[in-house]
Image (tube, grey):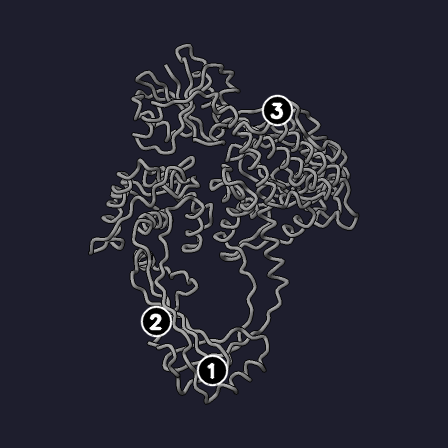
């Protein structure tokens, strides 16, 4: 019997259906000589620093850099039950081989191998490597399973990526946080360059000086022709004086047939960009809506970076297109239209997953409860399938040059000859009641008839003043595009990943920057905060540049091919982290409080470090785990914290009793104790706090 392990339960169900494993068990499906079970993404993760040494619980420059010699792992608390199921199945005597059916890529390989290693399994591995979840693709994949050893180098590259991110992110974050005695200053290979792009754009906008320019317009018989831009208003007015009352001659009229190619299908990033631009959705919200549609079987897998379908999906694509046209009346065409279904198919450009498209289940959407956001995202997906397979948008472009007294004026116009795919995009926007994006040339109108060599009488000349404009602020749309393209020129063509982050992680990176207070949203604009600007100002260039990611990806690709030693890559990362700590050992006195930590409220009773005021209450600047911001559930004032740290008594009112009433009491610190609790997201929180002696005020009378 063979055990098949997938990355997600939904994939397990699809594979089990095809290979005949339909008997349901506790955390698995069984039948026809197979057991099919699943992970929930990453079940196993790198251990926290204190797993290596208790002294790492305290954030201190003296403990940096933290570079484990032997890496330790831990099972995520919220997935321990499934790990136990997988381990039991892997070690079952009836199981003779393990089929790795996680996503066909670097991270999919990592997810499986870590579970395999932590379970202590030594059974032979077979690899299912497919890019489509179509039934034929799954069957063909199982007919051509490959030896797991063929992917050892891919696993090595995945380990290098994981360990390198841990070393750079953890050491960089602790280093600059303790140097500036500040709130947590998060440093990361993806997060930091993203913030740097925002800060750089903001500096460019802030430093922009508006400059006037002038153009001379020639108006005659419905024609508006324009001169080149001039910086001197007097020169523009002189041209008007020279040309006034003179004949203008049409020197040339050039007509060209042009077209605009159809858009590609959506990958996650392009879907997030359009949803932000058209509906104002954040990248994270778009992912949530799409994930929900996927779980309701209304669209395909969302976390993809491909904009094509695999070559074996032509029949599926035609069925989906037919259902879309019958479901969305505004995408229907009364006249037969040309459908180029093959242009959306290219297996060579499908990586882990194909493009996001609706499923044939959308014919039942009237019976399925969808939120407004889900409906809008689904309409985007449906429209994109139609526009991607429609005719090209075709038009005739006309450019005319008119001369008068040695000055040249130009006029441009266009006439649409085939609306093509833009007709369906316009129908979508009309149905959704959203305005069309204004693109360059969209407002061009047909020019009046003109003949080369002809003269224009009664031409009117005038000067129009304009001003140069700064770059626009980043929106999530343009920021996602910038992240996708960052470092692309430094990344080799055969690298698995390009840009900053992946389609699945970019939304979270943006949300983290906002949550941590380094970026703020102002309507659709993404603006770096003062803390964000300060953070970028103190970090070294090698951490801020997207070139770091490009260099990593180039080397990781070579490791995956077996053309570069993993050990050499990791030695380079260790040296980089060591030099980072060595070269950033002190901070000038005037900069120590640049992030607003301010004066200390007192000394930490656990480690002797400074207790400072933070966003969520007072805490130890040495990160030893001591928190002093609350007592008996009440948030303390700065004065109350100072008194406690000095051993003084404080008075609190309206404390809640177990019976639901309230009372008042005097509290005095009486040593410290550890505490722990689990957040709603499954994260374990541990630390230290004061124990208290309590005295009650005497009742009057």
Secondary structure of residue under mark 3: loop
The quarter of the image holding the C terminus is: top right
Give whichever of discs 1 and 3 has the lower sequence position: 3
Residue 446 numbered mark, or none:
2
* Residue 162 on image: x %, y %: 57, 31
Cα distance, mark 1 to mark 2?
23 Å
* Residue 354 on image: x %, y %: 38, 38
Q: Is residue 200 visible?
A: yes
Q: Which residue is mark 3?
A: 71
Q: Residue extending furthest right?
A: 589
In the image, what residue occupies the spot 66% across and 24% down?
69
**Neighbour class for label 3 at 10 Å: few (<14), some, many (≥20)?**
few
Corner quadrant of residue 443: bottom left
Cα distance, mark 1 to mark 3?
78 Å
**Neighbour class for label 2 at 10 Å: few (<14), some, many (≥20)?**
some
Residue 404 numbered mark, or none:
1
Q: Nearer the viewer, mark 2 or mark 3?
A: 2
Q: Nearer the viewer, residue 305 or 323?
A: 305
Q: Nearer the viewer, mark 1 or mark 3?
A: 1
């Amino acid at each position: 019997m063979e055990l098949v392990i997938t990355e997600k339960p939904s994939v397990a169900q699809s594979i089990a259906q095809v290979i005949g494993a339909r008997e349901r068990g506790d955390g698995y499906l069984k039948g026809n000589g197979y057991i099919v079970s699943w992970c929930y993404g990453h079940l196993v993760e790198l251990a926290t620093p204190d797993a290596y040494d208790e002294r790492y619980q305290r954030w201190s420059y003296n403990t940096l850099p933290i570079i484990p010699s032997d890496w330790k792992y831990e099972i995520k608390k919220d997935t321990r039950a499934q790990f136990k199921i997988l381990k039991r199945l892997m070690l079952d005597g009836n199981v003779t081989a393990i089929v790795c059916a996680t996503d066909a890529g670097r991270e999919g390989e990592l997810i499986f191998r870590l579970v395999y290693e932590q379970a202590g399994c030594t059974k032979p591995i077979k690899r299912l490597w497919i890019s489509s979840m179509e039934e034929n693709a799954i069957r063909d994949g199982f007919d051509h399973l490959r030896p797991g050893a063929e992917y050892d180098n891919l696993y090595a590259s995945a380990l290098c990526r994981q360990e390198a991110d841990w070393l750079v992110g953890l050491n960089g974050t602790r280093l600059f946080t303790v140097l500036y005695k500040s709130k947590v200053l998060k440093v990361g290979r993806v997060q930091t360059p993203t913030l740097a792009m925002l800060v750089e754009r903001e500096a460019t906008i802030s430093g922009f000086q508006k400059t006037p320019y002038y153009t001379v317009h020639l108006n005659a018989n419905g024609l508006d022709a324009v001169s080149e831009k001039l910086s001197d208003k007097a020169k523009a007015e002189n041209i008007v004086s020279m040309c006034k009352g003179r004949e203008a001659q049409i020197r040339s009229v050039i007509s060209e047939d042009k077209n605009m190619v159809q858009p590609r299908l959506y990958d996650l990033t392009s879907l997030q960009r359009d949803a932000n631009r058209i509906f104002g959705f954040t990248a994270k919200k778009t992912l949530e809506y799409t994930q929900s549609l996927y779980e309701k079987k209304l669209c395909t897998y969302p976390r993809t970076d491909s904009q094509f379908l695999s070559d074996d999906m032509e029949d599926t694509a035609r069925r989906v297109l037919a259902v879309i046209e019958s479901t969305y009346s505004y995408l229907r065409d009364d006249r037969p239209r040309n459908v180029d279904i093959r242009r959306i198919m290219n297996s060579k450009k499908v990586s882990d997953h194909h493009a996001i498209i609706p499923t044939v289940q959308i014919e039942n959407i009237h019976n399925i409860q969808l939120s407004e956001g889900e409906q809008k995202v689904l309409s985007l997906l449906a429209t994109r399938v139609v526009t991607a397979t429609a005719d090209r948008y075709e038009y005739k472009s006309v450019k005319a040059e008119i001369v008068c007294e040695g000055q040249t004026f130009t006029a441009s116009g266009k006439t649409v000859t085939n609306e093509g795919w833009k007709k369906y995009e316009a129908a979508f926007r009309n149905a959704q009641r959203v305005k069309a994006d204004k693109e360059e040339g969209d407002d061009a109108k047909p020019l009046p008839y003109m003949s080369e060599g002809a003269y224009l009488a009664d031409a009117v000349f005038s000067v129009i003043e304009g001003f140069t404009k700064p770059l626009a602020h980043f929106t999530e749309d343009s920021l996602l595009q910038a992240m996708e393209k960052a470092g692309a020129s430094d990344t080799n063509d055969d690298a698995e990943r390009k840009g900053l982050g992946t389609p699945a992680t970019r939304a979270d990176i943006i949300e983290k920057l906002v949550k941590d207070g380094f970026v703020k949203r102002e309507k659709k604009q993404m603006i770096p905060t003062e803390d964000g600007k300060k953070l970028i100002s103190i970090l070294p260039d090698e951490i801020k540049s997207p070139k770091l990611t490009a260099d990593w990806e180039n080397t990781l690709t070579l490791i995956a091919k077996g053309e570069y030693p993993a050990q050499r890559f990791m030695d380079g990362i260790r040296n980089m982290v060591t030099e980072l700590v060595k070269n950033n050992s002190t901070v000038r006195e005037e900069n120590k409080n640049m992030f607003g930590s301010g004066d200390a409220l007192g000394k930490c009773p656990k480690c002797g470090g400074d207790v400072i005021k933070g966003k969520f209450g007072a805490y130890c600047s040495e990160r030893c785990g001591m928190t002093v911001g609350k007592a008996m559930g009440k948030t303390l004032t700065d004065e109350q914290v100072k008194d406690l740290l000095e051993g003084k008594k404080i008075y609190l009112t309206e404390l809640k009793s177990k019976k639901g009433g309230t009372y008042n009491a005097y509290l005095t610190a009486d040593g410290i104790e550890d505490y722990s609790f689990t957040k709603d997201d499954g994260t374990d929180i541990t630390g230290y706090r004061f124990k208290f002696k309590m005295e009650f005020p005497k009742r009057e009378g």
